C-alpha cells in the first residue's frame, strides 16, 4: 500500500519549496500514480512545463492552480500555488496563512487522492529533449519525465530521395509546413529525427516512426503528419517540380544564415534520448 510522510516546510532552490511529500515508492512509481490519477480525472490536468518537468494541476472545486515536481528522494515537491486566471506564487511570495491554506487544499484535493493508486509498469525517459550540449545542466534529481511508446510504422518517401542527401528530409518537412500552414518542428541528426516532441524515427528506404511520446497526465490521440491527405498531395509525383523549388529556397535561406550547404546539421544538435534508443541507432552512409 502506498504511504507518504510529510516533511517540514522548507525553502530551497531558486524559487523555494512550499512543502515536500515523501513516498515509499520509487520516483517512476510516483510518476505512474500521478499519471493514473490525472488520466482518470482529466479536469485536474493543466500542463507540464517542458523546460523543467514541473506538473501543473487545477482543482475544479476551489479554482486553484498548483505546480509541483517529482524526483529527488522519492518525493513530490509543491513549488507554486495560486488561483486560476492569476499568476501562481512561489514560497517566498506567500504569507503564513495563505501558505497554510494552499497546503491544506493541495493535500486534501490531490495528495490524499494518490493513496491506494497502484503504479503501472511503464517506460519512462528522463529529460529526453535536452540537447547534448546541455548535458551538464541540473536535471538528474528533478528530471522531465516522458512516457515512451514503441511502434514501427513506415511511410513512403518522395522519389527524389533516391538521389538526394538525407539532409533534405528536414527541408522536406519544413517545406511541407509552409505548404500546409502548420507549425512543424523537426530535429535531425544524420538519418535520425524527432518531430514536435511527439514522435521520432529514422529515414532509410522509407520514413520509419519508432516511438511516440507524451508527458504526465497528457491524453493524446497519436497521429503523424504522414497520415494527412495534404502530405500525400505534397509528396505526390505530380508535385515534384514544386518540391524542388521549395528545397532550393530553403537551402538558399540557410546559406544566407551561415550554414554550409553540405553541413546543415551540426553533430552537437543531436539529443541524449536518441543515443539510448536501440531502434534509433541504425544509420546509413550518406
Image (cartoon, rainbow, N blue to C red):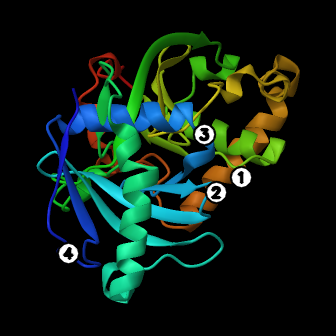
Q: Which mark is residue 249?
A: 1
Kindly report which numbered mark, 4 or 3, lies closer to the viewer in this rendering. 3
Residue that label 3 marks:
42
Which element type, helix, strand or loop, lies under badge 1?
helix
Residue 8 location (% of width, % of height): 14, 68
Label 3 and label 1: CA atoms lie apart by 44 Å
**Residue found at x 57% / y 28%:** 164
Name the image quarter holding the N terminus: top left
Residue that label 2 marks:
252
Q: CB of mark 4 within 8 Å of CB of mark 3?
A: no
**Residue found at x 47% / y 13%:** 151
Q: Nearer the viewer, residue 202 or 92?
A: 92
Left or right: 84 in relation to 165? right
Left or right: 20 in relation to 64? left
Total label count?
4
Label 4 and label 3: CA atoms lie apart by 30 Å
Which element type, helix, strand or loop, lies under badge 4?
loop
Left or right: 232 in relation to 20? right
Kindly report which numbered mark, 3 or 1, lies closer to the viewer in this rendering. 3
Q: Nearer the viewer, residue 82 or 107?
A: 107
| In the rendered image, the vertical position of residue 240 relative to residue 146, given as above or below | above
**Residue found at x 29% / y 72%:** 18
Q: CB of mark 1 within 8 Å of CB of mark 2?
A: yes
Residue that label 4 marks:
13
**Residue found at x 34% / y 22%:** 280
Kindly report which numbered mark, 4 or 2, lies closer to the viewer in this rendering. 4
Amino acid at each position: 500500500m502506498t504511504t507518504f510522510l510529510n516533511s517540514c516546510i522548507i525553502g530551497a532552490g531558486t524559487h523555494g519549496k512550499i512543502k515536500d511529500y515523501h513516498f515509499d515508492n520509487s520516483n517512476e512509481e510516483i510518476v505512474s500514480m500521478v499519471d493514473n490519477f490525472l488520466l482518470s480525472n482529466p479536469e485536474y490536468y493543466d500542463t507540464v512545463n517542458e523546460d523543467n518537468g514541473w506538473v501543473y494541476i487545477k482543482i475544479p472545486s476551489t479554482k486553484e492552480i498548483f505546480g509541483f515536481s517529482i524526483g529527488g528522494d522519492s518525493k513530490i515537491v509543491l513549488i507554486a500555488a495560486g488561483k486560476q486566471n492569476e499568476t501562481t506564487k512561489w514560497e517566498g511570495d506567500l504569507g503564513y496563512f495563505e501558505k497554510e491554506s494552499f497546503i491544506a487544499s493541495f493535500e486534501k484535493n490531490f495528495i490524499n487522492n494518490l493513496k491506494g493508486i497502484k503504479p503501472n509498469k511503464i517506460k519512462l525517459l528522463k529529460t529526453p529533449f535536452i540537447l547534448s550540449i546541455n548535458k551538464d545542466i541540473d536535471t538528474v534529481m528533478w528530471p522531465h519525465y516522458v512516457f515512451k511508446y514503441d511502434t514501427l510504422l513506415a511511410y513512403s518517401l518522395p522519389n527524389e530521395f533516391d538521389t538526394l542527401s538525407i539532409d533534405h528530409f528536414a527541408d522536406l518537412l519544413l517545406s511541407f509546413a509552409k505548404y500546409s500552414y502548420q507549425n512543424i518542428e523537426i530535429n535531425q541528426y544524420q538519418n535520425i529525427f524527432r518531430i514536435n516532441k511527439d514522435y521520432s524515427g529514422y529515414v532509410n528506404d522509407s520514413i520509419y516512426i519508432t516511438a511516440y511520446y507524451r508527458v504526465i497526465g497528457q491524453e493524446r490521440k497519436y497521429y503523424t503528419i504522414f497520415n494527412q491527405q495534404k502530405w500525400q498531395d505534397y509528396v505526390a509525383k505530380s508535385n515534384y517540380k514544386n518540391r524542388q523549388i521549395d528545397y532550393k529556397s530553403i537551402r538558399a535561406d540557410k546559406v544566407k544564415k551561415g550554414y554550409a550547404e553540405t553541413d546543415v546539421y551540426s553533430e552537437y544538435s543531436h539529443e541524449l534520448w536518441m543515443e539510448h534508443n536501440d531502434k534509433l541507432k541504425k544509420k546509413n552512409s550518406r
